[in-house]
Image (cartoon, grey):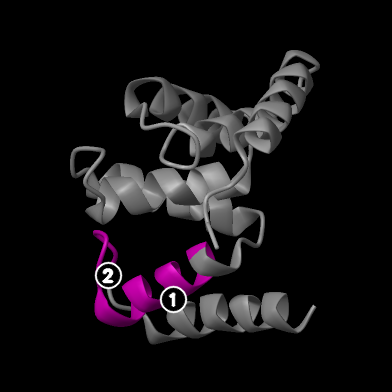
């Protein structure tokens, strides 16, 4: 049994997301970018600008993806300050993984942050609320 998605289904999803992007849905651009990062193709040169556009438009998942890549991913150059800024943007929208990363960063004094147990606990508490909702 194949685990690869049916190419006809992928093309239908691509058409739908393209139409939604034209209609102003920034998340659709992020979804298209993910397709170009391995689901349907490998085209990081077109995918990364789309992810940046989605992040700039406030898509929390795109903001988290950029933060993760800027911190430790192979697709973007290391930029700890940029990573922290994108983690903070995603956390402002209660993105659970961004909240957890900031909690860890405050606990350990990472990402250019001063260690602060209280701030770490605050971020961890927000993440736990996300998990329970």
Residue positioned 24% across, 55% down in the render? 72
Instruction: Read off the magenta span.
Output: 98-113
Residue positioned 55% across, 29% down in the render? 56
Query: What residue would you read off at disc 2?
Result: 114
Residue positioned 78% across, 23% down in the render? 20
Magenta segment: does it hold 99? yes
By secondary structure, the bulk of the magenta-drawn segment is best described as helix
Q: Quadrant of the N terminus?
A: bottom right
Query: What residue would you read off at disc 1?
Result: 103
Residue 76: % across, % down: 25, 38
Judging depth in this view, the residue of 2 and 22 nearest the camera is 2
Residue positioned 34% across, 29% down in the render? 44
The 10 Å Cα crowd at callout 1, few under 14, some 14 to 19, many 20 or more, is many
Q: Is residue 41 left or right of residue 123?
A: left
* Residue 127 figure quarter: bottom right
Q: Nearer the viewer, mark 2 or mark 1?
A: 1
* Residue 47 figure quarter: top left
Q: Is residue 30 above or below residue 64?
A: above
Residue 119: % across, % down: 47, 77
């Amino acid at each position: 049994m194949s685990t690869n998605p049916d190419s006809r289904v992928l093309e239908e999803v691509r058409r739908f997301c393209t139409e939604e992007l034209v209609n102003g849905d920034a998340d659709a651009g992020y979804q298209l970018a993910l397709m170009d990062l391995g689901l349907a193709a490998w085209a990081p040169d077109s995918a990364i600008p789309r992810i940046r556009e989605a992040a700039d438009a406030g898509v929390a998942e795109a903001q988290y993806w950029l933060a993760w890549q800027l911190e430790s991913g192979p697709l973007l150059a290391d930029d700890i300050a940029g990573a922290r800024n994108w983690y903070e943007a995603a956390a402002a929208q209660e993105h659970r993984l961004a909240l957890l990363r900031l909690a860890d960063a405050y606990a350990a004094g990472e990402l250019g942050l001063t260690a602060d147990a209280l701030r770490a606990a605050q971020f961890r508490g927000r993440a736990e609320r996300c998990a329970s909702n």
